[in-house]
Image (cartoon, helix red, strand yellow):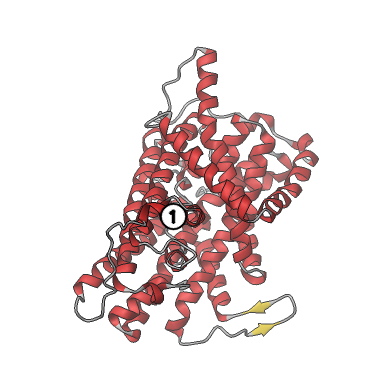
Amino acid sequence: MTHKYSRSVATNMVIANMIGTGIFTSLGFQVLEGGIPDPFAILMIWLLGGIVSLCGATVYGEVATRINRSGGEYAFLSDIYHPLLGFLSGWVSLFVGFSAAIASLALATGEYFLPVLGVSNDPLIKLEILEITPSKLVGISVLIIVLLVHLRGIKWGGIFQNVMTYVKLILIGTFLLMPFIFLGDYEASEISFAPTDKTMDTILSVPFAGALVWVMFSYSGWNASTYIVGNLENPRKNLPFSLIVGTVVVTVIYILMNFVFMYVARFDELALQVDLGNVVANKILGTKIGLLFSLVFSLALVSGVSAMFIAAPRVAEQIGKDYSVFKILGQQTKNGAPKYALFLIFVISFLLVIFSSFKEIIEYIGLTLSIFSLLTVFGVFILRAREKKSEMHATNYVRAWGYPLTPIIFIGVTLWMISYFVIDDPIRLVWSLATVIPAVIIYYATQSNKNKNDSTPTDKLDD
């Protein structure tokens, strides 16, 4: 029996991947004087982030259904450009993109959960290169629980993903209504959301471009369901649905959440805060009842960890199918779980939780991941040119909405962000290149072990 993920799982993967720590931290830096302290401009930057992500999602729908292999950019870039580029993308996704994101979400879960436990985050063990804190122990517990669930197979992993995402959406819905249910029980910020005579200058400023980098980091994950296209029921219909609907839902949620943050709390109350959900909940409900929201926020973050435990192993699994030296990663249980790929992601994430902080990691992986997304979106022009040259017009894939405007918008804004990123701190580019150097060495060292037959894209999508 072939196990497949349903449309709801794919859509919830997108939603859960996108809604993580970014939405609860970015605004705390945007309201500073060096940021974009204009309520209207802040809402516009989150709308722009959603539009750019939606443009990318529509193009990814075409690229993914044309190539029809699980693995996301690893599969796409291998087919469109060269297997080396795909391997580099897979390397960054596994060892930095997914694993670092999983680890940061696990740690954030611990941070939100600590107030419920009533303990401080003082180190329990402190050595020269190792520091174990209560938040790290909670994060490790989350990793173990999610690993065990997904080892049960596609069916149980899908059920768990749906349940945890619905918990997250119910929480967010409650959170958005809460300021108006308890209206009068707290002192609102009285911020004006109307544009001012300085709003346009703010939108065209360099800090706006810098803030957009972190907004797009918050939107990252809009392409999540492309990683399971080979394991998805009716991908021609369900993949674009999951990408577009998931992205639109999150865009609306992000704009509404930022509105609520600024409606409830003053800029000085939001500045530099990395747990805005707790800040707002405590102001409306008081500290004691706010603890309940800390608990639910921590549970909500688990859905993001789970979603990445679905997507990331599919990259490792596809590499295992393409390279015999890594073939153990391509093995599945009878329930469809890529067990060794799951263990690999768990081990990398576990080590990052134990040994790392993520401020530096997030700064330089944002650049690298943006480059791979940019190349994937540009690939739609190459795929269409190939089709035109071959004079064979296939009908078994979806076509990107708004082509060529949607890929042009995504490429233009992404180039703008990358330029700001490099000019602001050129060392980030050096770190990004350093990240992929080991992958180049491994790629050429394993060329004699490549399973060329396994890397050929599937010709036809399931109906």
Q: Return the residue at label 1.
A: 18
The answer to which of 333 and 289 lies nearer the viewer is: 289
Identity of the residue drawn at 63% across and 61% down = 361
Residue 341 visible in image: no
Identity of the residue drawn at 66% across and 32% down = 82
Q: Is residue 291 left or right of residue 355?
A: left
The part of the image, by quadrant, that contains residue 257 is: bottom left
Please tell me how crowded label 1 is: few (under 14), some (14-19), or many (20+) other residues with Cα within 10 Å. many
Query: Residue 27: where, in percent of width, then height?
Result: 42, 65
Q: Quadrant of the C terminus?
A: top left
- In this rendering, the count of numbered labels is 1
The answer to which of 194 and 263 lies nearer the viewer is: 194
The part of the image, by quadrant, that contains residue 128 is: bottom right
- Above or below, comparing residue 291 to residue 257 in the picture: below
Residue pushed farthest front?
Answer: 197
User: Mark 1 belongs to which amino acid?
Assistant: Met
Q: Is residue 263 left or right of residue 446?
A: left
Query: Residue 200: where, in percent of width, then height?
Result: 37, 51
Residue 402 visible in image: yes
Q: Is residue 432 left or right of residue 413?
A: right
The part of the image, by quadrant, that contains residue 448 is: top right
- Above or below, comparing residue 132 to residue 105 in the picture: below
Query: Residue 177: where, in percent of width, then height?
Result: 24, 67
Identity of the residue drawn at 50% across and 29% down = 380
Query: Residue 167: where, in percent of width, then height?
Result: 34, 64
Identity of the residue drawn at 63% across and 85% down = 124
Looking at the rendered structure, the secondary structure element under dot 1 is helix
